[in-house]
Each structure stands twice: as structure tokens, then as C-alpha cells.
Image (tube, rainbow, N blue to C red):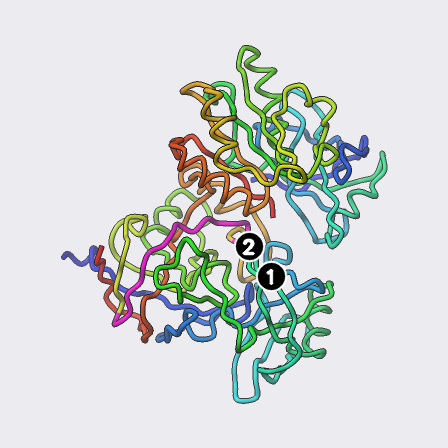
Amino acid sequence: MSESQKLAVSELHVYPVKSCAGWTLDRAEAVATGFAHDREWMVADSEGGFITQRQYPKMALIRPSLSPEGLTLEAPGLPKIVVPIIEDGARVPVIVWESPCTAVDQGKAVSEWLSGYLGKECRLVRMAPEFQRGVKEKYRKSGKEVVGFADSMPFLLTSQASLDDLNSKLADKLPMDRFRPNIVVSGGAAFQEDAWKKIRIGSVVFRVSKACVRCEITTVDQRTGEKGGEPLETLGKYRTGPKGVMFGQNLIHENIGALQVDDIVEVIE
Amino acid sequence: MPDWQKARVIANVPAADDIRSLVVAPSEWVPHRAGQHYELRIPGTDISRKYSVVSTPYDAGRLEFGVQLLANGALSPRLWALAPGDALEIRGPWGESFLWDAQSGGTPVLIGAGSGITPLLCIYDTCRAARPSAKPIFIMSAKDKGRIMHYEKLEDILVTRFTAEAGRIDADFLRTHVVDAAPGPDASCYVCGPDTFIDSVVDDLLDLGLPPDRIRSEKFD
């Protein structure tokens, strides 16, 4: 295989709090629900509805980090807050799209911090330890597939070649962080990932389950929280399918294991 | 790329039990393409939301939007409270993935739920104006007729599914009202409504054999 065709992991990302800034990692553990800590927390409104950058693009500027003391959140204009992790506290029903989950309220202090930042009553929640959120019926194979607070799937994969193709059509080039992927693959041809059915990275085998239909979060500059028109306008011209504008593929893993940057990506099927 | 501009409210009246018809005059009106939307926001605030244009591109100087009231909404309650003469900010038109044009558009088969009616109204009226001999199909799913925007103008042509009596649209309904209605080989389906409505209807249309490149959808979440 020529150099340009060699497929390898170029980036790994984890987003501990749904719709907030993520971590860029050299190595990530795939556990039952996806990468460890990926969408382990979520911001919910007073009715348990999930809150995202769709409604509040400035969530992009909330930066989480983890330490033995708990989860730390930082955001512009606010003192940082350390949230000791409450594993077994007050249970609250929450809902992600049409998927009801049982979550644990992470307390009043962080609720006030978030509500102040967003200008809306809300709280931080974490999945209840006993609750298993199954992946949608039609995408299951073993029946045991689970996911955290991600929209629907444990992983999103994008390819650098696809971004390069999109950017060739844009005056203002966009960074990959617009797409909030977990795994970025370098090498090969644009949108090659649409034809993949099964891949292996390191010791982990992934089913490539469906094209990711993009929403307006892709139009939010992840560094400033500002919303624009791209990439949806340009993607709309050539990447529209029956369910919307597509970029990237969702994956479901068939086993657990560690992934590292520079791991070779093997297309099995 | 479009920029924010001021618009003046011309009218804001009930159009369904939970939808108001908001008509504005932008400072710089441009013709949109049927299916496109604008972002709206109250001046001096930073919360913006997308609303499809209901009026046709032939209706120069004005833009009509359908605003559904969401109790927990960050913007809709404020839009509902606007009076003629009030200022609004708008940005657009946006949208390249859910469009109907007289030149290239086939016979529209419109399938909507709730506030998803808004871009479909635009496509329907634009088609009637630009291709009067076309026979579009317009299907609406709603709890009851009180929830359908501009129902009194549409009731003679609309195929309705009132979910309170009959439940949700399913494959049998689509087979009868889309496939068996035989809209012709140039027909294009436009599906608009909540996320789960789109998933269910699009999956059914694909299972019924409609070609993927003849199906377009817009999710309202």
C-alpha cells in the first residue's frame, strides 16, 4: 500500500461533558459505553431535557478536566468549579432525543454555576451506575451494546481526507473540531469511510453502523462559541442524503481495548 | 455569507392553536429559494433560532414565518409577544440541502408533522405559482386540525393523519398516499418535522422503494 493510502489514527478525542470542550489524547481506552469518560456527564434542564450547543453555542467554551478531587469546569468570566463526583445521589429522569435515562444530579453548586453561565436553569447530571442506555434497537447485534450521553452511538469517526475535500471548497478552512469526532483517520481518499463496514484499530473491532447526519453544532466555532453558516451550506450542496447532510461515520465497537495515535486502521469489510 | 440585518414586524397573528404567523419586512429583502430558512433573534440578545420561510420568493419585501410556542423555549415566547412595528434581527437565507426550484424540482410530495409544515407550505405555494399544472401531494400529521398552520386554506388539498384518532403515519399509510397515488417519475419527497418523525418516515419511504436521491428531509428539533 502506498504512503498516501496507509490508513492510521491521527487524532483521538474524548468529550466528558456532552456539548462541552473535549480532550485531545495520544491514547484512549474503549470501555463498554465508548471511550472512557466520553459523554459521561450532561447538562439537563429542569424537565430533564438535554441541553447542547444547538441551543447554547457558548457551551463550547466550558472546559472540563478530571482529578482525584473530581470534575473541574472552567469557562470564560467565571471562577473554576470543582465538582466532587456523586456516584449514588438523587436520581433524576433525563432524556436524550427519545432515549430516557436515569441520571444522578451532581449537586446545587455546579447547577448554579452552569445556570449562571448559560442564563438558563439547568444542572449537571451523570449516568446512574445501575442504568444501561442501550444503543437503538436497529443497530444492535449482540443486544448488549450500550452508550453514554452521546446522541446515539459510542463513536464518531471522521477522516482527514474528507475534511481536506470540504476545505478545498471553502474560502475559510475549518478545523476538524467542528465535527467533534472521537477518532480521526489519516490517509486514503475523501469519504472512503462511507464504504467501510468493519474496521480494526489495535485490538478493537468496530462495526461502521451509519453515516453521521450533521446539525448546526458544526457551524459553531469551537474556540469562540460563535455560530456561522459553514460547513452546512457547502456540505448541503454535495453531501445531502435522505436524512440530511452527512459527514463522518458512527461506529459500534465489538470489544474493548486501547487505541493510540498512529495505530494502523485495517478495513476488514 | 448573509449577515444580521434589522427587520420590522408587519403582523403577528394566530395561524394554529400553537403556531403564530409572524410577518416581517427586512431592511434588505432578497428572494429566497423554497425550503430555505432565516435565523431570528430579538435585538440586544444573543439567542437565535432557525425558522423556515413560509412565504414564497414571489412575495417581494416580506417574509412570513410560523412560530410554534414552546413552553420552555428560549425565543418563541418572545417572538409570540412581538407587535406590528417592533424590531427583529434576521440572518439568511440559509439552506442548501432542502430546496425546491421550479427549473429542477419535480412534483413535490410533502410530508410534515407539527411546525415542520413551514418549509412545506413554501414549497407548495411556490410550486403552484411556478408550475400551475403540477399536482403536488401534501400530507400532514398532527394531533388534530387545530394544530395545522393555515388549515382553512389547505383543507381541500391536504391529506391528513390525525394522530389523536389514528396514531402515527406508518408504511401502509405511505404506500396508499405516496406510492399508490403515483405522483410520477419526477416526484421528490420532502419530509419535515421532529427527529423521530423523519427517521420513521424516511426509513419507510426507502423500504417502499423510493430512490434515496428523491428523498430530502429537514429535522426540526
Secondary element at image label 1: strand
Give the left or right position of residue A95, taking residue B184 as reference: right
Q: CA distance from mark 1 to mark 2?
A: 23 Å
Q: Quadrant of the N terminus of chain B?
A: top right
Q: Nearer the viewer, residue B203 or A236?
A: B203
Residue A82 in the image: state x and y as whole percent: 62, 83
The answer to whether residue B27 shows anywhere in this view is: no
Question: Residue A146's quadrant in the figure?
Answer: bottom left
Q: Please check the rendered image and state whether residue A143 is part of the magenta-colored stretch, yes or no.
A: no
Name the kind of residue labelled 1 in the image.
Ile
| Residue at the extreme left of the image, as rendered | A1
Any mark on residue A220, and which? 2
Q: Position of residue B23 (x, y in %)?
A: 76, 31
Q: Closer to the camera: disc 1 or disc 2? A: 1
Q: Residue at x 43, y 51 (%)?
A: A212
Chain ID, mark 2: A
- In the image, which residues are magenta? A202-217
Which disc, if any, is residue B45? none
User: Above or below — where is B78 with respect to A148?
Assistant: above
First in sequence, mark 1 or 2: give its number.
Answer: 1
- Can you give x and y, in whole percent of width and height, for residue B166 in the image? 62, 37
Vertical arrangement, residue A43 with respect to residue B6, above or below = below
- Near mark 1 (Cα within 10 A), the count class, few <14, some 14-19 or many ≥20, is some
Q: Is residue A206 magenta?
A: yes
Marks 1 and 2 belong to one chain: yes
Whether residue B102 is visible to the viewer of this picture, yes or no, is yes
Q: Which mark is residue A95?
A: 1
Residue occupying the point 47% across, 39% down? B202
